Amino acid sequence: MFLSAVPQPSGEPRSRMSRQSQQQHRTPIRHIDNTVEVKSKFEAEYRRFGLKRNGFGGFQEFYHLLQNIHHIHGVEVLLEYADIHGDLLPINNDENFHKAVSSANPVLRIIITKKEGDSVVYTTNSLQRRRKGLGLTGLRPAGSGSIHSKNKSGLMIGPPQDFRQISSIIDVDILPESYRRVRLHKYGSKKPLGFYIRDGVSVRVTPQGVEKVPGVFISRLVRGGLAESTGLLAVNDEILEVNGIDLTGKSLDQVTDMMVANSHNLIVTVKPANQRNNVAPRGSKNSMGHSGSVGSGGSIGSALSHDSPSPASQSNPITASSSIAEGDSYEEDDDGDVILENDCLSPNKYYPVTNSNSSTLNRDSPHKGQHSVIPQSVSMPNSLGTSLSHSATMMSHHNGGSTHSVSSSQESMKEDGNVITL
Amino acid sequence: VGEFFSTCGFVQPSKECKSRLRGGSHLAGAANNVAPFQRDGAEGCPSCNFLVCVCARAPPSVTRVTSVLTHSSGELLLLGTEGGHVFIVEVPGFRDCRSTIHSDLQKPPYDYIGRRNLEHVEALQENPINSNQVAIGYGRGLMVIWDLNHRCAIRHIPATQQLESMWWTENGSCILSSHSDGSYCCWTLRTGDKKEEEEKSNIPYGHFPCKAINKIVQLPTAGGPPFLLFSGGMPRASYGDRHCITVIYSKTQVAFDFTSRIIDFFVIRDGPHHTEPSALVVLVEEELVVIDLQTEGWPVIQTPYLVPLHSSAITCSHHVSAIPLKLWERIIAAGVVQNTQYSKKLWPITGGQNLAPDPPQRDLLLTGHEDGTVRFWDASGVCLYPLYKLSTAAVFNADADLNDNMSQSAEGEWPPFRKVGCFDPYSDDPRLGIQKIHLCKYSGYLTVAGTAGQILMLELNDEAAEQTVEAKVVDLLQGQEGFRWKGHTQLDVREEPVLFPPGFQPFTVVQCQPPAVVTALNLHSEWKLVAFGTSHGFGVYDYLQKNTVLVKCTLNPSDQLAMEGPLSRVKSIKKSLRQSFRRIRRSRVSLRKHHISNTNKVIQEANARLEAELAEMELAPVQRKIEARSSDDSFTGLVRILCFADTFLSDSSHNTPSLWAGTNGGTVFAYILYIPPVEHRADEALTAQPAKEIQLMHRAPVVGIVVLDGHGAPLPEPLETAHDLARSPDLLGSHHVLVISEEQFKVFTLPKLSSKMKLKLTAVDGSRVRRVGVAWFGSSRTEDYGESGLVFLTNQGDVHVLSLPHIKMQIRYPCIRREDVSGIASCVFTKQGQGFYLMSPSEFERFSLSTRYLVEPRCLVEAPLPPVFSNQHQPKLEGASSALRYMLSPYFPFFLQEIQKSLEGDQT
């Protein structure tokens, strides 16, 4: 394992989310066009308030507003928000604050955590040991004040907090040194994968001598694409495997189709054209993987991340386990088909205006299709991020007054489109 | 006389025949020998086969065989070569070249001395009354009569024009020669030492330069003038592109005008001594045409096999298994009425026995064509036999008169053309092209959909009827703005009543707006609904109330390509061309400006960068972009599949009629249909309510949707249970829906739509699903056991079978070459585990995955055993192995006999 320290999803945040979503059902939503509904949470307390979509200033202003609202003056806090893909993302400057406000549909959910608490959780192994000792029974690290009083100035180890992982080199410990296995995380980002492949001739050393065999190579990287931005792939790298499947004997078109089919979680094994920057396997791979997973164990942000290859490669380091691990994690990702139930489909012209009262009224006359509003449900099977996205979708869809017109249905579908790509 | 290949059946043999002849035709004379081969059928097959071997291996050299003569003794084969030599070999051994006639042995007559080279051997003919004499025709024109016994030339006939073919008349007194300048000559052979006399040189379509006469035949009749037949010879300038065979008998002369190149022809003769010419058999490139020469007017005899499938290009096909007898008879009756122009004469070619058992059921293959016709083929047996032809053009105001082609033989026209053959590749209006067909075999309702968004509902009627076809325009865009359709216009439906002949008669036309090609079609005859889809959306039409039930737009508003129709692509090419020209011009301008000022430096840099990029792109090899599918891709809204199902969509206790639609963008829409009870069906409104929507994460096109009942079996066809032909579906257990995308198979539970299981295809082996069907595989051992399976064809040309409902891979079989894209696209699966695909534009290949339903071309040609075979020759080992090949091929039972015999000989 390298770079991709991967968290174990803890049960705690999820249950918290579902509690929220239940609350959501009970609370009628009032929504006026250009205000953003903000729901912020600090420890066990919730606050709700409105925010002018365009009339609000920058991050600092917002930060102070939150401190005011939660009465936590002087406490250093981290702000995070739930984005439409179900990820927790940080708010720490004007830019990502505006991003957060603009992506709220219609609720912007803010989670406030104490800064000291976090650093404690991420740094020390003492917590992990302690948790193990306690038998891992639902003890919330961030909430247990006894711990963060101890190590106040720990070093940050683990995935960086303010960034979203887009790529990683994996399976360094089991691959030959001259190969590199790269995982590209597409998430829901608009950023294209951005590379081209071509046919070529590969030279292999066999017992019979040097042999020339057809191979597939990277022919071009698109400027600004995911592949280029990782810096892990380069033109003329030979592609050997796609998601653990050997490409020997496959045509360029077949390889293209395979890569497209796996594009949501693409793992390519390449033989880099430039062999000077290879990563040597670490001596103690076990401790590597261990510390990786432990380090981020309590992180809320990465608890929602989808991949978990480290346990597999840890448990099965001798075989070419990567493919299994990849397969597993891919399965999880892949079940992200979105199923919309009936009234999600009823086209909505306006953004939620009615409250649940009117919807119950309308329920009595379901035959007038355009007004029938039943609380919709969106199911996303097996996804780790289900609960969060669930509630997010819930909010975006919990709506009433709707008019039959396809153009507006297109609009609402476009909004849904973001949800769909989960 | 006239033993042709046996019942041959199916369409594949036509290729064999053609390729054999075509292969031989560059041996020039080989094709000419079809007739003699058939006449003495005994050694016809093997020597014919030998020829194929020869020409397959022969490099262009002086020894290349250019003409062949099978001697009537059955013992000799004469091979004329490029170098002008004639080799005489013994059959069937092909061993011993007893003698060779060298061209330099010929001592041309004095006046011929100026030409040194006689060129290749163009033609070989045997004297019909004296088998010791053969005529050798050289390319330069010289003909030599050679005596085989004395091995010397008897006569020289010094023709001066390039020789094309030669014919020795029946009584042996004349030789006809045809030449490259469109002339033919008749040379009378006088007895004694007198010189041959050129009786007459005749250019039949004279005055202006003519094309060559490729083959000439003259046949006597019992009590009258002889028949003269020749191919070619048309005036070069005006009719040089016609493919004609001229028949002259007494004062009658007709130039049969074929639509494709003539490969060969021969005349079948009957009567007590097999002397009367009765039928002309013409093999043209695309079909086999037989003309009755004994009936007044020389009508065409309908071929019982080898009917050209592609008389107009095939655009789609649809297979219906197990047709009820009643419907079958009605279709046949409708077809009989159409075939009045054919000769009443029986098919003149006999020989061979069809050993295939009677087909267990009646199967129909429907082919849709570019010219708006639908042809119904009897696909139950080996041979595809045409039953009925439906033309949809009559519904619309088409510009061209359909009978234009046939009525062109005006009085006094010269040459006296007559159009024959049904191969007609020219379509009057491409919008008429048929894209989708669906036939309900129980109710006799048929729906066909075409290129210009037209959907026709047709009903089988045994009487002719004059009726107005009701047109209904359905706007699939549903008010979506910012759009201009740039494709073809919609077809113009005739408003006045049209007389429709007995058969399938249209009663309603639905026209999609915009008139994009219909990409999905389904018919539910029990609910009387037809569902249709294009690249813009889909709709459901109630053909009882003549009303639209549902219209849904699936178009992504930013999808310009789908919006504007097929022409926008052309436009974009034009645009990019224009842009590149502009770029070049701009760079020139900037170059000029460079001297004047530096103000445009920025533009120049940009130009340079653009050009560098362009150059880079041009230099780059074939490359493929790796990108995830997104909702912004083109044609994501194109509807790929529509399916009706009576299943549990809203809750698990009430089954309701439903419609399922799958798009190119990996979306599945499910609608609950409310259909009034039968007594109110005609007056109460039907409604459709959106119920579910699945967006597959990988966004691959959805190519199939199958609803499985509580037992995991696919739901029966509409009306199937009503006719007691299928077990009613299990409505107690929970239903499932299987969604098949190009990349994977996924089973969802109903009504929850939670994912139950899936099978990935593309992610694992890189192939994608192209065609899919549900088939029932009956056990070959017991009558009552069978399983349902999902059959699919990938873009790699492999056929796979998956078990249902557990979607486990059962078998994979490479079926079609992966390069054969049109073959893969044309594949249809039958309900019994068979399939058809176009192996060429004119040939369907049939394959079977079922052990119970097999259709094999089993037939036998009984050949009289010539005495030469009793003289045992030692078969070589390699001979035996090659004979094994012939055993597999049903057309050479003769070889079987030979091999069996030689094996028996070895044992004793």
Image (cartoon, coloured by chain):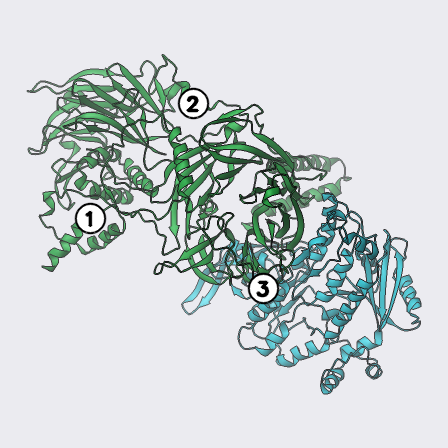
Chain colours: A cyan, B green
Horizontal side of residue B844 vs B591, given as left or right: left
Chain at tag 2: B
Which residue is rendered at x = 28% and y = 45% of the image? B57
Query: From this viewpoint, is residue B498 visible?
Result: yes
Which residue is rendered at x = 65% and y = 39% of the image? B476
Horizontal side of residue B351 vs A351, given as left or right: left
Dot 1 and dot 2 residues touching (CB under 8 Å): no
Labels 3 and 1 in the same subunit: yes
Q: Which mark is residue B756?
A: 3
Whichever of callouts 2 and 3 sits on the residue coming sooner in the sequence is 2
- Residue B275 percent coordinates (x, y): 17, 26
Question: Would you identify the image quadrant in which residue A188 lies?
Answer: bottom right
Q: Which mark is residue B895?
A: 1
Q: Quadrant of the N terminus of chain B?
A: top left
Alpha-carbon distance for marks 3 and 1? 57 Å
- Residue B651 percent coordinates (x, y): 65, 58
Q: Which residue is mark 2?
A: B405
- Residue B761 percent coordinates (x, y): 52, 59
Q: Secondary structure at mark 2?
A: loop
Question: Would you identify the image quadrant in which residue A390 lies?
Answer: bottom right
Alpha-carbon distance for marks 1 and 2? 46 Å
Residue type pointed to by label 1: Phe
- Residue B745 percent coordinates (x, y): 54, 58
Residue type pointed to by label 3: Lys
Q: Secondary structure at mark 3?
A: strand
Outermost top residue: B412
